Amino acid sequence: MIKLTVLYGHPTDPAAFEAYYATTHMPLVGKIKEIKKAETTKFRDEADGSKAAYYRMAELWFADMDALQAGMGSEAGQATAGDIANFATGGVTLLTGAVD
């Protein structure tokens, strides 16, 4: 399995981020047929009260690298990737890795 991890920085307006993420962005993600599993995390503050390094994380699992490339290269994948700039005011980091 291959996992695409999307790490979102802290947005300028968390309420606007959450509304857009739930009603617009995640439905786009759902149209990428090659995704085998998707999971999202909203981080909490650290134990010492400081902000977490990232605001949110999305993890998308694909059967293999070919499936990831096909999914993200598809019309749905391109629409999803292109949508990130519409709400991710805190920036985004993408990581790809093999799941053990």
Image (cartoon, rainbow, N blue to C red):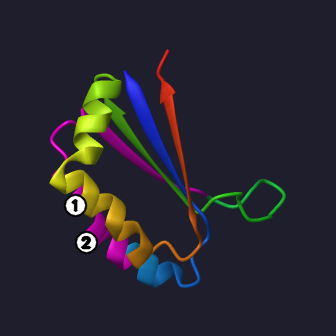
Q: State the mark number for residue 24.
A: 2
Near mark 1 (Cα within 10 A), the count class, few <14, some 14-19 or many ≥20, is some
Q: Who is closer to the viewer here, 43 or 73?
A: 73
Image vertical order of residue 4 relative to residue 52, above or below: above
The x, y position of residue 24, in whole percent, is 25, 72
Q: Amino acid at mark 1?
A: Leu
Q: Who is closer to the viewer here, 80 or 52?
A: 80
Near mark 2 (Cα within 10 A), the count class, few <14, some 14-19 or many ≥20, is some
SS for callout 2: helix
Q: Residue furthest top?
A: 100
Q: Residue furthest right?
A: 48
Highlighted range, magenta: 19-43
62 on left or right of 76? right
Image vertical order of residue 55 relative to residue 17, above or below: above
The x, y position of residue 89, in whole percent, is 54, 77
43 on left or right of 63? right
Image vertical order of residue 27 relative to residue 62, above or below: below
Q: Quadrant of residue 54?
A: bottom right
6 on left or right of 39? right
Q: Residue at x 43, y 73 (%)?
A: 85
Q: Amino acid at mark 2?
A: Thr
Q: Marks 2 and 1, Cα distance to the nearest angstrom? A: 7 Å
Residue 3 lies in magenta, yes or no? no
The x, y position of residue 86, in whole percent, is 39, 78
The x, y position of residue 55, in whole percent, is 59, 63
Residue that carries the numbered disc 1 in the rendered image: 28
Q: Residue at x 74, y 65 (%)?
A: 51
Do residues under tags 2 and 1 come within 8 Å of each other at their CB atoms? yes
